[in-house]
Amino acid sequence: MTRFDAIIIGAGQAGPSLAGRLTGAGMKVALVERKLFGGTCVNTGCMPTKTLVASAYAAHVARRAADYGVVLDGEPRIDMKKVKARTDTVVLNARAGVETWLRGMNGCTVIQGQARFEAADTIRVGDEQLTAPRTFINVGGRAIVPDMPGVHDVPFLTNTSLLALDRVPRHLVVVGGSYVGLEFAQIFRRFGADVTIVEKAPRLIAREDEDVSQALRLILEAEGIRVRTHAECISLAPHTDGVAVGVDCTEGPPEATGSDVLLAVGRQPNTDDLGLDRAGVAADSRGYITVDDSLATNVPGIWALGDCNGRGAFTHTAYNDFEIAAANLLDGENRKVSARILAYALYTDPPLGRVGMTETQARASGRPLLTSTRPMAKVGRAVEKGETQGFMKVVADAETRKILGAAILGTSGDEAIHGVLDMMNAGASLDVLRWAVPIHPTVSELIPTLVGDLKSS
């Protein structure tokens, strides 16, 4: 039995930084990583996918070169092996950076292997037993493989295995019309694949407002992506051309046949093999560890950070989990997850930047609202770039004059949304943002104008 002051399970976004804070406070820390350092973001999430987004964007702009007065000879050619090699380099460099940092950290012992609880204060990793009064679970998540008819009779891809491809699929059928599915759909369409999206819900990205959903659908369809919604019953079957995807839709052909199928229907936490029951740690029916507002579990001395706690599904929320836990434990603060204003982005092109409530959520609250919308075609920066698809929208409380939420579906929307996020975090009224003087020409410069146009609705 080896004793530590703290054990961290998982080297994702929260784990390494937490190890740095704990060891900096003089604690002896064990960090256990089963496989790849850096977690989902570094290995199968943000970094590889956004690297692919960049390559796909380059191909898209090359095809549009004539629109900018640039003459290229012939159709751009995609060298998928080079695309993959570039992506792999980005991932490997980031992964190595995390591992090197941890292994060189004074006071931190890195242990590779599967961690399982034997008791609330005891972890087994292979033949080693570790004990500590504090344990932080940071095990992330993985793609769900749904129990749909025929799923085990055909080859299929997940976000992880798709990244291993060094070829462009002839026809990629994407099952799932949310964030992961839409990003990959556009990436591979721009690489030259035929792409069909199959979504069970009546519309894409159903968590967003209907106008956002519809606008994004039109953007994808304009690039030649086929979208099949209302797919109430989806089935898979072998086909001479690859995989036949049965689609029980209210319109369109009953089947979509692809050379490759990507399952992008959600994610699940990596908690099923941790032995949580031996520690008495509570989890919900989907395997997400139950935590309170400070990220503590029901067992004293055990916390859960990142995707596995169900309180956020993003790299930045996982990192903020680390910040909350460290501030409360080491700095005497009382930070709470409920104080976090959620913001995120969908990295299609153009991207969707989102913060706070949707308009639908705000209306459901019953409060009097102010709303404002402006098309990106009225944004000078978008016109200059020749990227005028999408729109900006903000929703505010008519009585408190506080911004409740915003959406920017348009060029640089993922960056421009931070102007609204910062004002919301500062608790400022919309009038403060209205009189800001942003830089011209930017997308952000239209935010004060957008706020100035707020009207009762």
Image (cartoon, helix red, strand yellow):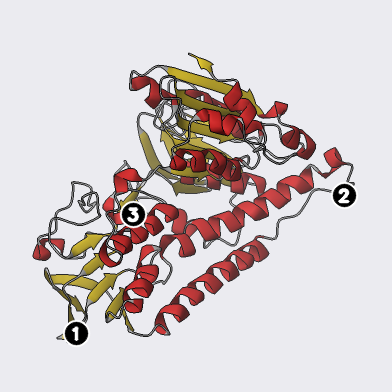
Mark 3 Cα within 10 Å, few/some/many (few <14, many 20+)?
many
Q: Is residue 65 left or right of residue 439?
A: right
Question: Where's residue 163, x and y in %?
Answer: 52, 59
Along the polypeptide, which appears first: circle 1 or circle 2?
2
- Say if 281 sits above or below 264 in the image: below
Along the polypeptide, which appears first: circle 2 or circle 3?
2
Which residue in the structure is indicated by mark 3? 307
Question: Where's residue 152, x and y in %?
Answer: 33, 51
Q: Please, what is the three-letter code of the amino acid marked with disc 3?
A: Asp
Q: CA distance from mark 2 to mark 3?
A: 45 Å
Secondary element under disc 1, as helix, strand or loop, is loop
Nearest to viewer (mark 1 / mark 2):
1
User: Is 334 or 210 nearer to us in this picture?
Assistant: 334
User: Is 129 or 13 nearer to us in this picture?
Assistant: 13
- Identify which residue is drawn at 66% across, 36% down: 223
Question: Where's residue 10, x and y in %?
Answer: 32, 68
Asked if disc 1 and disc 2 are in contact, CB closer than 8 Å, the reply is no
Q: Quadrant of the N terminus?
A: bottom left
Nearest to viewer (mark 3 / mark 1):
3
Which residue in the structure is indicated by mark 2? 72
Residue at the extreme top: 457
Q: Which mark is residue 127?
A: 1
Q: Please, what is the three-letter code of the amino acid marked with disc 2?
A: Leu
Q: CA distance from mark 1 to mark 2?
A: 61 Å
Secondary element under disc 3, as helix, strand or loop, is helix
User: Is 318 or 234 nearer to us in this picture?
Assistant: 318
Question: Where's residue 388, x and y in %?
Answer: 70, 32
User: Is 176 or 326 nearer to us in this picture?
Assistant: 326
Q: Is residue 79 left or right of residue 270?
A: right
- Identify which residue is drawn at 51% across, 29% down: 430
Secondary element under disc 2, as helix, strand or loop, is loop
Q: Please, what is the three-letter code of the amino acid marked with disc 1?
A: Asp
